Image: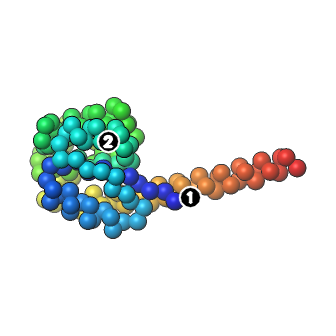
Amino acid sequence: MESVVKVFIADDSEVVCQRLIDMLVELPGIEIVGQAGDAAEAIKSIQKLHPDAVVLDIRMIGGSGIGVLKGIKKSEPNTVAIMLTNYPYAQYRKKCMNEGADYFFDKSSEFEKVAEVIRHLAEDSHNQAGRYAKFKQQAKSNDVRKRK
């Protein structure tokens, strides 16, 4: 059973989006399912696509990444939310973490940490998928034995 981690990127900078995509497509088990440059499109797309992880900027056109974060955690509470920002101030970090962010990274000094987190998610997902497949196979063979 092949498991893929679906990632969505929400940032109003095309350069940042492309850099993230270039970095993440190199990782096995990752699929970039979408991206948005404004808050409204991000919320709409995330609700439609149900990604496993989202990378959000704090400041976006038409709203904030914090508003998007609130919406995600209400409708998709298991989605891993990674805040990636040029505003790494304590008050933003605290607000994001209180709203359910799983990670908070500074674009200027921690950009590569996004790939680390996503890679770990993919590894965990792959390991869980393998355990599930093994469990399913064991259950199936137990079922066959019971029928005999």
- The answer to whether residue 62 is left or right of residue 119 is left
| Amino acid of disc 1 | Met
Q: How is the image coloured?
A: rainbow
Q: Which mark is residue 1?
A: 1
Nearer to us in this view, 46 or 56: 46
Residue 139 locus on image (x, y percent)? 71, 49
Residue 40 locus on image (x, y percent)? 21, 37
Instruction: Work out which residue is located at the far top of the displayed protein and give it.
Output: 74
Residue 37 locus on image (x, y percent)? 18, 47
> Dot 2 lies on which element?
helix
Q: Are marks 1 and 2 in contact (CB under 8 Å)?
A: no
| Residue at left offset 83%, top offset 46% | 146
Q: Which mark is residue 46?
A: 2
| Residue at left offset 61%, top offset 55% | 133
Nearer to us in this view, 100 or 58: 58
Nearer to us in this view, 96 or 18: 18
Between the C-alphas of marks 1 and 2, the distance is 25 Å
Quarter where residue 68 is shown: top left
> Dot 1 lies on which element?
loop
Sooner in the amino-acid sequence: mark 1 or mark 2 = 1
| Amino acid of disc 2 | Ile
Residue 36 visible in the shown view: yes
Quarter where residue 5 is shown: bottom left
